[in-house]
Image: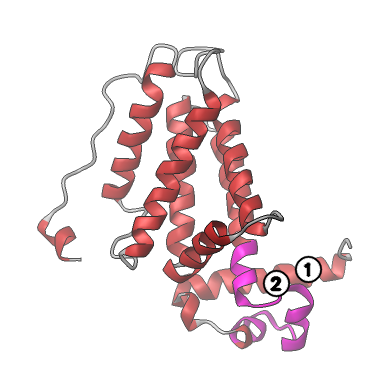
């Protein structure tokens, strides 16, 4: 059922407060009561829109994913830069969501069978978003994918990089930021190696390598 204008404003207040409070304090340190108090919305009203606090984060991540996809598609650059921008944006959102939420999402996606679930839908939306980012100017000019590029395979390889990084990050209990310079450096190198030979003219210049970790990085 579509929400009324008033209901849309109420939901938007809850989402805005949740984003602000979780950004400031972390997911585990924010309660439903904190969100409703900050937004000026009655606690009981919260449950008209969300079953639990995790649903708020899922909604915010969905919004972020849509915006990152749109921004990447419209980026004035080549397919390689668009893909790197897109994955970096998703990593930043994963850092924001936190290990517990990402671990739960990965677990649900692996354990779901039969009827499509929300997590399976999210994975399919991810695949489609990567394809959109890759193919918006396919075959048009240097720096774009060739018309005969195996885009489905490439999209799954990019998904594999993203989901693999999330999995290792969760297994190591978030020891590093997915969006830090070194992690993004490896993303750029990995995606560059995937796409280079399928791009018209290849990637301009050399495929960048990630910066070497410093002693301080190794201590984290």
The residue that disc 2 covers is 13
Residue positioned 63% across, 70% down in the render: 56
Chief secondary structure of the magenta span? helix
First to last magenta residue range:
34-59
Front residue of 104 and 67: 104
* Image position, residue 175 (x, y; %): 28, 65
Q: Are marks 1 and 2 in contact (CB under 8 Å)?
A: yes
When asked about the image quadrant of residue 157, the answer is top left
Q: Within the magenta stretch, is there residue 204? A: no
Residue positioned 45% across, 37% down in the render: 158
Can the viewer see residue 128?
A: yes
* Image position, residue 126 (x, y; %): 58, 44
Q: Within the magenta stretch, is there residue 47? A: yes
The residue that disc 1 covers is 9
Mark 2 neighbour density, 10 Å: few (under 14) some (14–19) many (20 or more): some
Q: Quadrant of the C terminus?
A: bottom left
Q: Secondary structure at mark 1?
A: helix
* Image position, residue 207 (x, y; %): 28, 27
Q: Is residue 186 above or below residue 104?
A: above
């Amino acid at each position: 059922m579509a929400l009324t204008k008033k209901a849309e404003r109420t939901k938007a207040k809850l989402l805005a407060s949740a984003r602000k409070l979780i950004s400031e304090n972390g997911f585990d340190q924010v309660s439903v009561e904190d969100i409703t108090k900050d937004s000026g919305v009655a606690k009981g009203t919260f449950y008209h829109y969300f079953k639990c606090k995790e649903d708020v984060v899922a909604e915010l991540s969905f919004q972020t994913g849509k915006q990152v996809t749109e921004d990447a598609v419209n980026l004035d650059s080549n397919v390689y830069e668009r893909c790197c921008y897109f994955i970096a944006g998703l990593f930043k959102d994963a850092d924001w969501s936190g290990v517990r939420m990402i671990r739960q999402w990965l677990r649900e996606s692996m354990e779901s069978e039969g009827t499509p679930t929300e997590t399976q839908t999210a994975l399919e939306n991810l695949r489609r978003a990567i394809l959109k980012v890759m193919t918006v100017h396919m075959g048009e000019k240097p720096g774009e994918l060739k018309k005969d590029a195996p885009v489905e395979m490439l999209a799954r390889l990019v998904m594999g990089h993203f989901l693999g990084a999330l999995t290792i990050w969760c297994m190591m209990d978030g020891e590093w930021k997915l969006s830090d310079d070194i992690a993004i450096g490896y993303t750029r190198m990995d995606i560059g190696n995937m796409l280079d030979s399928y791009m018209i003219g290849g990637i301009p210049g050399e495929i960048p390598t990630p910066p070497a970790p410093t002693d301080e990085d190794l201590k984290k």
